[in-house]
Image: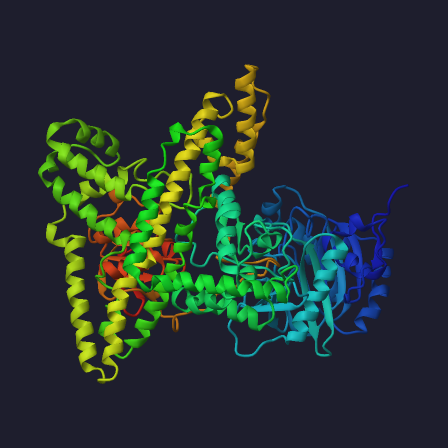
């Protein structure tokens, strides 16, 4: 049956029989009407390229008769509805004509002609890529006189997150969609508590929409998208009677899906309530990168359960221990599960107190979500009075361990003794396969548990610092220098011992100069072989024996240590030969120690007589306790170095047996998988049978790909399980043009050129440059002495890198959000570490 040339229908009576001929705009609105949306009355005409002056007279008569009832409502609007617009592939947004303000038949026919003619306009033909006129349907509607109008995206087209976007302007929405005015904008979310959360994205004195209107508009838009089965780009209007009208509906054609972050919980059965909060606060600078599967498995199954057991008095093999684990893996990186962390008795309270000194911004986020009822404590199964009573002696025991730190020198000596026992364990080459598996689980061994418990000493050091800092608040100079120049921090001592290597290498400067950056391994071989450098090479071996277990990203087993590859140390020595001895970190520390002593003495002299003993006691105590901020971790990293050696030895053996293709593949497997592979290999060797087919390479390839994806796509520092983004509160004061704000870590004002680094490469940083990095774990600290100042995206007053920067007296500003993107290498900036301000000189920006 031949379809009629023209079909004219009332909009609410458009049948499916002809919808494909009415055009995208009409089709979209007819679908909205079908699911109950309020759409202005209208008439739809099927698409054509014929102008109305050649239309059949009966068609014209029919239209003029039908349109009378709309004229009775007021002015009309004539809209194009092309067959190709508002589709799932192309929108043609704004390219076809829309004629408002039609008041009589003459204007109606002119408007229809203009709309049809727009199908052959240059902009339409250019967008479509065709060279002939496109058929245009006609939509004639009652024109709404809105007091506010706008658009609504039920899914963010940019893929930023899962929020619904509403934009609004006063009066007609045409100014908005045509880009002639700036709208008010909101993002709206439904939280895990099934509540609306509205984020105002534009600053305006008076909102065009009330909270109730925003919620009602969002609720209806979400309903429409669900009913139609795809995300929608909607146009809407609210008239003087507060009635909401829907004026257009098109599929979102250019949208990017919001990121989906992969979460691997330490325990899948936990009850965190409606919303889980994850944060990498205080771990992002020491654990910035995705972990390989073996490292995460050891943290999850060996290290964290032992810590929780010690703190909570629950046996490490108890069922509830898994529900107390406060860390998860987010996009391959270690994050605190804040619900679980706060639920840990005693630890939750201590966390809030210590975060005041470590990361104020994180504390503000936690307090805000708690006060709004979004962040709730994890529910612990079987938690009862009996279990709470069992925790009392555990807490007393934990407190007793902390009291043992009342003798800080003795505590440090004890840590060294235990670490030496770790280092003196038998060579891994002498161990059996099963013994290697046990060695990889070294954190569970009684010899390593005291070192793990020693990490609690860091809390005591932090508390002593916070107390001393508060006590000297009336004397700013002493307060700023209170931790500067204090000896004994093993991480700072790395820089001091590198100074000794530099001084010892000065007679060998010509040998060092014969090698270019990147040739450190060749240089090392030369120094190892020639007679005149043997004494220096012996000093290097002494250094590596003491500090070789350290290095960048040192909490991940897959990362080489300095004793595996000392290239970074060789490069630091080589570049240090060009720096005068008087500029060494050793001389800087000595000067700072004198300045600290003078400032403290002056403060104590100025203090009331009754305060002086207390201030003197705290200043002395801080010199004893501050090294404990780093010493426990420094010694515990011997455990990680030992685990790495055992894993690599097992990897070599599995490679020889044809299971792995390289020893480093061992880090891509988990503990139970390594045990299983080892059993298979043992059976194969004993029976002399061919190795059974194992699809292990496919698994390793998949995990390598996943690790690369995790590395390329990092989750936010704070993440909610309901997908609602965390709007970070500003710790600094008001915004200033050309000024970046952060947290001043140490004293000093420096002007210099920026050097942005993503790896701890000594060859890339010239003396006197301002080092700018996303994070700075302790493996970066040997670079600090040559930097004029340090700027870091993340970190707080007592993070590891901040402690070292203060002790070395290097001006530093931490917590400068997005600084590695806002600054450029070669740009000149002034760093004011006292105020936390970075003044940017934009005229010196390099391309």
Q: Looking at the image, which residue is at 30% across and 76% down? A: 471
Outermost residue, right direction? 1
Q: Nearer the viewer, residue 768 or 485?
A: 485
Q: Nearer the viewer, residue 545 or 113?
A: 545
Residue 694: image quadrant is top right
Whether 548 is drawn above or below 787: the answer is above
> Can the viewer see residue 618?
yes
Question: Is residue 53 found left or right of 120 in the rendered image?
Answer: right
Q: Looking at the image, which residue is at 62% across and 49% down? A: 124
Residue 736: image quadrant is bottom left
Q: Nearer the viewer, residue 663 or 39?
A: 663
Question: Is residue 633 found left or right of 186 in the rendered image?
Answer: left
Q: Where is residue 642? Give x, y as percent.
A: 38, 39
Q: Where is residue 664? Give x, y as percent.
A: 43, 32
Q: Where is residue 39? Give x, y as percent.
A: 77, 65
> Can the viewer see residue 184?
no
Whether 532 is drawn above or below 231: the answer is above
Quadrant into which the N terminus falls: top right
Outermost residue, left direction? 507
Question: Is residue 148 found left or right of 827 in the rendered image?
Answer: right
Q: Where is residue 202? Give x, y as percent.
A: 52, 69
Q: Nearer the viewer, residue 79 or 540?
A: 540
Question: Is residue 742 found left or right of 134 in the rendered image?
Answer: left
Question: Number of numbered discs present?
Answer: 0
Residue 456: image quadrant is bottom left
Whether 458 is drawn above or below 145: the answer is above
Color style of the picture? rainbow
Whether 275 is drawn above or below 687: the answer is below
């Amino acid at each position: 049956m031949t379809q009629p040339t023209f079909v004219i229908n009332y909009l609410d009576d458009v049948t499916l029989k002809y919808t494909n001929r009415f055009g995208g705009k009409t089709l979209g609105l007819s679908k909205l009407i079908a699911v109950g949306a309020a759409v202005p009355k209208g008439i739809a005409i099927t698409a054509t390229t014929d102008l109305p002056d050649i239309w059949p007279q009966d068609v014209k008569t029919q239209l003029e008769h039908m349109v009378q009832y709309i004229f009775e409502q007021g002015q009309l609007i004539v809209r194009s509805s092309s067959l190709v617009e508002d589709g799932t592939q192309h929108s043609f947004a704004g390219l076809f004509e829309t004629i408002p303000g039609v008041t009589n038949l003459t204007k109606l026919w002119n408007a229809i002609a203009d709309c049809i003619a727009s199908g052959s306009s240059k902009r339409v033909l250019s967008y479509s890529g065709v060279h002939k006129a496109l058929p245009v349907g006609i939509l004639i509607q009652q024109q709404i006189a809105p007091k506010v109008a706008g658009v609504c995206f039920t899914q963010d087209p940019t893929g930023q997150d899962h929020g619904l976007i509403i934009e609004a302007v006063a009066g007609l929405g045409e100014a908005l969609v045509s880009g002639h005015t700036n709208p008010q904008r909101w993002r709206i979310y439904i939280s895990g508590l099934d509540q609306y959360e509205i984020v105002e994205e534009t600053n305006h004195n008076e909102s065009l929409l009330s909270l109730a209107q925003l919620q009602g508009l969002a609720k209806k838009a979400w309903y429409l998208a669900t009913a139609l089965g795809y995300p929608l780009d909607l146009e809407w209007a609210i008239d003087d009677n507060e009635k909401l009208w829907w004026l257009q509906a098109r599929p979102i054609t250019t949208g990017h899906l919001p990121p989906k972050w992969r979460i691997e919980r330490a325990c899948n059965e936990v009850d965190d309530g409606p919303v889980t909060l994850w944060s990498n606060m205080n771990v992002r600078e020491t654990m910035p990168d995705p972990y390989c599967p073996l490292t995460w498995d050891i943290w999850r199954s060996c290290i964290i359960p032992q810590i929780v057991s010690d703190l909570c008095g629950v046996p490490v093999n108890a069922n509830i221990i898994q529900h107390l684990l406060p860390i998860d893996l987010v996009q391959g990186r270690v994050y605190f599960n804040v619900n679980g962390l706060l639920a840990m008795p005693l630890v939750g309270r201590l966390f809030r107190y210590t975060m005041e000194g470590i990361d104020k911004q994180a504390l503000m986020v936690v307090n805000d979500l708690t006060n709004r009822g979004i962040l709730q404590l994890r529910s612990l199964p079987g938690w009862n009075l009996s279990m709470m009573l069992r925790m009392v002696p555990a807490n007393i025991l934990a407190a007793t361990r902390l009291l043992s730190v009342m003798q800080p020198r003795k505590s440090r000596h004890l840590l060294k003794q235990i670490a030496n026992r770790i280092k003196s364990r038998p060579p891994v080459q002498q161990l059996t396969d099963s013994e290697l598996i046990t060695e990889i689980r070294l954190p569970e061994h009684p010899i390593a548990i005291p070192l793990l418990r020693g990490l609690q000493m860091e809390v005591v050091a932090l508390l002593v610092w916070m107390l001393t800092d508060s006590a000297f608040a009336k004397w700013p100079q002493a307060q700023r220098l209170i931790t500067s120049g204090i000896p004994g921090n093993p991480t700072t001592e790395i820089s001091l011992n590198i100074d000794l290597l530099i001084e010892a290498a000065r007679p060998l400067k010509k040998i060092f100069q014969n090698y270019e950056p990147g040739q450190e391994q060749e240089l090392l071989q030369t120094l190892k072989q020639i007679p005149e450098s043997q004494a220096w090479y012996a000093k290097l071996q002494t250094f590596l024996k003491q500090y070789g277990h350290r290095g960048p990203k040192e909490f991940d087993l897959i990362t080489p240590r300095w004793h595996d590859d000392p290239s970074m140390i060789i490069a630091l020595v080589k570049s240090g030969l060009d720096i005068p001895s008087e500029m060494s970190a050793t001389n800087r520390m000595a000067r700072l120690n004198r300045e600290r002593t003078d400032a403290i003495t002056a403060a104590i002299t100025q203090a009331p007589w009754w305060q002086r003993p207390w201030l003197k006691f705290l200043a002395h105590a801080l010199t004893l306790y501050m090294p404990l901020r780093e010493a426990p971790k420094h010694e515990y990293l011997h455990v990680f170095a030992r685990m790495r050696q055992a894993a690599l030895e097992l990897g070599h053996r599995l490679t020889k047996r044809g299971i792995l293709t390289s020893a480093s593949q061992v880090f891509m497997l988990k503990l139970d998988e390594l045990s299983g592979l080892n059993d298979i290999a043992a059976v194969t060797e004993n029976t002399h049978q061919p190795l059974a087919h194992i699809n292990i390479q496919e698994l390793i390839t998949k995990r390598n790909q996943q690790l690369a994806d995790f590395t390329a796509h990092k989750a936010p520092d704070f993440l909610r399980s309901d997908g609602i983004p965390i709007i970070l509160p500003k710790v600094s004061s008001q915004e200033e043009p050309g000024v970046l704000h952060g947290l001043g870590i140490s004293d000093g004002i420096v002007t210099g050129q920026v050097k942005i680094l993503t790896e701890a490469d000594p060859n890339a940083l010239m003396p006197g440059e301002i080092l700018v990095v996303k994070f700075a774990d302790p493996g970066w600290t040997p670079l600090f002495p040559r930097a004029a100042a340090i700027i870091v995206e993340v970190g707080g007053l007592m993070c590891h890198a901040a402690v070292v920067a203060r002790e070395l007296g290097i001006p530093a500003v931490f917590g400068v959000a997005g600084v590695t993107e806002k600054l450029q290498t070669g740009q000149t900036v002034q760093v004011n570490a006292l105020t936390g301000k970075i003044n940017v000189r934009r005229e010196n920006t390099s391309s």
